[in-house]
Amino acid sequence: MPSALRTGGRSAAELLAAIEAFLSNAKQPALLEPGEELMPLSAENFHLEPRGERLTLQAWDRTRNLTRRVTGITETSTARLELVVERFARREGRLFLLDLARRSGAELGRRSTRLVFRERFRLFLHRQFPEWNLADLSTEPNLEFSLSPAFPRAFLRHGQHGWAAIACPPDADAGAILSFGLIWLAYLRTRERRVTVEGLALYLPDGHARSTALRLLCLDPAVARYELFSYSEQDYVVRIDPHDHGNVDSRLEHCRRPAPNIVETFQGIVSLPGVEQIRRHDGRTSLRVRGIEFAELAGSELLFGMRERRPASEYHLAEIAHLAEELDRARSPDADRENALYRQYPEAWLESQARAGIEALDASLASDPIYGQVPAFVGGERGIMDLLAVDRAGRLAVLELKASADLHLPMQALDYWIRVKWHLDRGEFTAAGYFPGMELRSQPPRLLLVSPSLEFHPSSETLLSFLSPEIEVERIGLAMDWRRNLQVVFRLRGAERPR
């Protein structure tokens, strides 16, 4: 038998059997050729054809048709099969069959996809910065400086001048790119002492640049310059002027007054220990225990339930009371910390504490009204809690609550601040019935970031240092036992560091 057919010690029939066995066990099979896009496999786009002592593999999608002669297998596991193949002109190469449902297979697939996009990014940079030297281009993680491998980053140099650059792949979170880009810019300014790193260039997929453009308008132009680009599937790159995206996509619903009196039938539920009444802008009253909502009052109707809401009658009072009492036990500061109800929704618990002790966070803030998620974000959970309050002089304050470390907290908080300022500048809070009887000042809102003292991400100061001086930011660090008692242990202005 020719040696080519015995590579790895397997015949063509043995190779066929090994490949078919791997594919039959793979839950999410895919093919990877180094330097090419990952190709998901199914019976409709994959074929193995034994031809005497030869085994030919064929796979295709909308843009590719790949044919390779398989000559051996060098590595096999439940997550991947590494094939030796013969390419055109009898050149030897490697081909990988992966199971993306398995961790190591998925990781190899992600890494390959990142490397492919890194090369696309290289072409973008050569087009936009043709006279500049590409001194660094990487997709490697840097945990010490919180640099993600998901976003390729580059350093461009021209004499004693430099630029940082970062790109968002089509399948990545476009909302995260500015945080990582600013961290990369700050890192390069520290590393490249002999070069003036002037600014940051950001590349995002078509249709995903609006949020980043709005954020860029809130950064200090005296600290850095910024260039924003979008790219298409065909790799057409267009420069974007952030000022062209000045209109904020936000809608403020009218604030309705809740029913003045609670139906006598449900008064006992409202009076149970630990039950909080939170008036919502839609006119309903939320009934919660340390942040977890178990019922809501809508006019004279009470709806209750943790998963599904049911209308309540007097026959349900005992069931509702039991639910509230169980939450009160599970959400107690002294409760079992392994209990799922204790661990769930920490930001909601922190919101409960902040509402009850708003003056402990800032003595100038009024205890009522306090609005949650107003204006609301479209697209579901953001992982942080937004509160809107006002001080006694009529100046708005945006409170962002986070119970655990989050690198993106400053930029996500900025998104909410942008929307609040947008509606404030147009007089829409007063027109929509918010803060009744109060004259709101036109001064930009304050931005308060509230978190346990040890849970502010180490990159917070770096990110905050890029914000415009117009944005008055304060970090409020809480004692770690915040579930029991809301105690402030530090207050930091802007990018100020703890002493």
Image (cartoon, grey):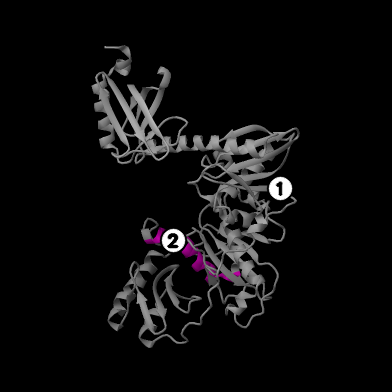
Looking at the image, residue 111 lies above or below residue 329: above
Measuring from the top left, give residue 244's x and y in whole percent. Answer: 65, 58
Q: Which numbered marker is on residue 225? A: 1
Q: Which stretch appears magenta? A: 341-359
Measuring from the top left, give residue 49's x and y in whole percent. Answer: 27, 27
Residue 353 magenta = yes
Q: Quadrant of residue 468?
A: bottom right
Q: Nearer the viewer, mark 2 or mark 1?
A: 1
Q: Residue at x 42, y 83 (%)?
A: 299
Q: Which numbered marker is on residue 329? A: none
**Which of the pair 128/286 is nearer the observer?**
128
Q: Quadrant of residue 374?
A: bottom right
Q: Which residue is mark 2?
A: 345
Mark 2 burial class by Cα count in 10 Å: few <14, some 14-19, many 20+: some
Q: Residue at x 47, y 79 (%)?
A: 283
Q: Residue at x 35, y 33 (%)?
A: 59
- Which quarter of the image is occupied by the N terminus? top left
